[in-house]
Amino acid sequence: MKNKELMQRDLSVLWHPCTQMKDHEKFPIIPIKKGEGVWLEDFEGNRYLDAISSWWVNLFGHANPRINQALKAQVDQLEHVILAGFTHEPIVQLSERLVQLTPKGLSRCFYADNGSSAIEVALKMSFHYWRNKGQTTKTRFINLSNSYHGETLGALAMGDVSLYKETYEPLLMQPITVPSPDCYHREPGESEYAYSERMFEHMEKALQQHAHETCAVIVEPLVQCAGNMRMYDPVYLKLLRKACDKYGVHLIADEIAVGFGRTGTLFACEQAGISPDFMCLSKGLTAGYMPLSVTLTTDDVYQAFYDDYENLTAFLHSHSYTGNTLACSVALATLDIFESDNVIKKNQVLIEEMANATAHLRDHPHVAEVRQTGMILAIEMVKDKKTREPFPWQERRGLKIYQHGLTQGALLRPLGNVSYLMPPYVITTEQIRHLVKVMEEGINLAVAN
């Protein structure tokens, strides 16, 4: 089969995500035949280095032999079973290990299929907790500006990226939105710590004013990924944990994109030394293999639902594939690799290489900022470096970096005018340097006229 044939068949039947389909009159779809390690390969032998981990999910490379073996072993034994009234060994093992690995106090695991669903679970569970406790005035949530938590209606409501949200506003809950501690906006000479601490004043005021009607505060710890990879200091999370305790409000940590080593620690909350009331995980949970998510919570929350059936306090939320056996087996294999290969420590070499390879781009006349948190690095391209005036979004200059990347064997899908690296952990230092070279070439092409 040739690439062109599959492209034509695709466009006759598919509707792709996060895509204006008319674009494909100009920009061809890339058919992928197979993957191996950091590489994706099309039907004509062209290879693309997956610099964004296929939407931030892949941790240990495509077609990882160890994960493949775990999946093959499980599929011959049990593919799926209803999780209401039944259980299976992989999900019990996975839950035991997640409780052990996540911040102290998170002792119960509730499973769903994807990140948005995990957020929905946390929102409903928090609201329902307060209702079971007799606090029926708590019906709202506090979020951060520029945040993103998914595309289902509850998760979408908690986000604040207008590109995704604006059209659907009439359908959505209205959260109380607090200015983000996004350090891109700090004053010249101001540290990220000082700015994040200063910006917490807005959250403090919101909690003072709205705690009586607020179920929970929801945040993406340290990095607002879909919000152009904007970053902030862990001190904000420390202050937030104390304030949520003070005002009697839950804290939901959306670690769907930043968990499993992306920020340099296994979970981002570790860098602040805090435990949330709810932690949502997905993406890297199965190393990019299968849809699975989990919402972890505390025994205090669990006990608020534990009652006689006739009192109708149970959490009656479900998904058909909740706790899918195959996905749980893959997740266990993923955790095995973290443990046996000392991944978090080894990643420090890659983190340092990403920083060193991009350091010179800080002086580029059209780069406003090179920012990095662990294995996430972003380069923000602007029209005017001094004023940080952005290029008009209609010019889609980031797309030029993406197109150039494809010609050089690199998958560098941008976020607007932000080009970023969030690679699989099996990438080499040499491959990092190659990606940075391609990014720099793409930026130069994108700002050329």
Image (cartoon, rainbow, N blue to C red):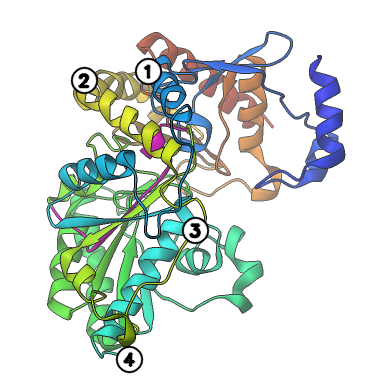
Residue range (magenta): 274-288
Residue at numbered disc 1: 66
Badge 3 amino acid: His
User: In the rendered view of the protein, which quadrant contains the C terminus?
Assistant: top right
Instruction: Pinpoint residue 431: horizontal percent, then vertical percent.
Output: 44, 12
Dot 4: few (<14), some (14–19), or many (≥20) neighbours within 10 Å? some
Residue mark closest to the camera, 4 vs 3: 3
Q: Cα distance, mark 4 to mark 1?
A: 50 Å
Q: Cα distance, mark 4 to mark 3?
A: 28 Å
Q: Residue at x 72, y 24 (%)?
A: 31
Q: Is 281 part of what is drawn in magenta?
A: yes
Residue at numbered disc 4: 137
Badge 4 amino acid: Thr
Residue at numbered disc 2: 340
Instruction: Pinpoint residue 339: horizontal percent, then vertical percent.
Output: 20, 26
Residue at numbered disc 3: 319
First in residue order: circle 3 vs circle 2 = 3
Q: Cα distance, mark 2 to mark 4?
A: 48 Å
Q: Residue at x 86, y 22 (%)?
A: 5
User: In the rendered view of the protein, which quadrant contains the N terminus?
Assistant: top right
Badge 1 amino acid: Arg
Q: Cα distance, mark 3 to mark 2?
A: 32 Å
Q: Which mark is residue 204?
A: none
Q: Report which quarter residue 386 is drawn in.
A: top left
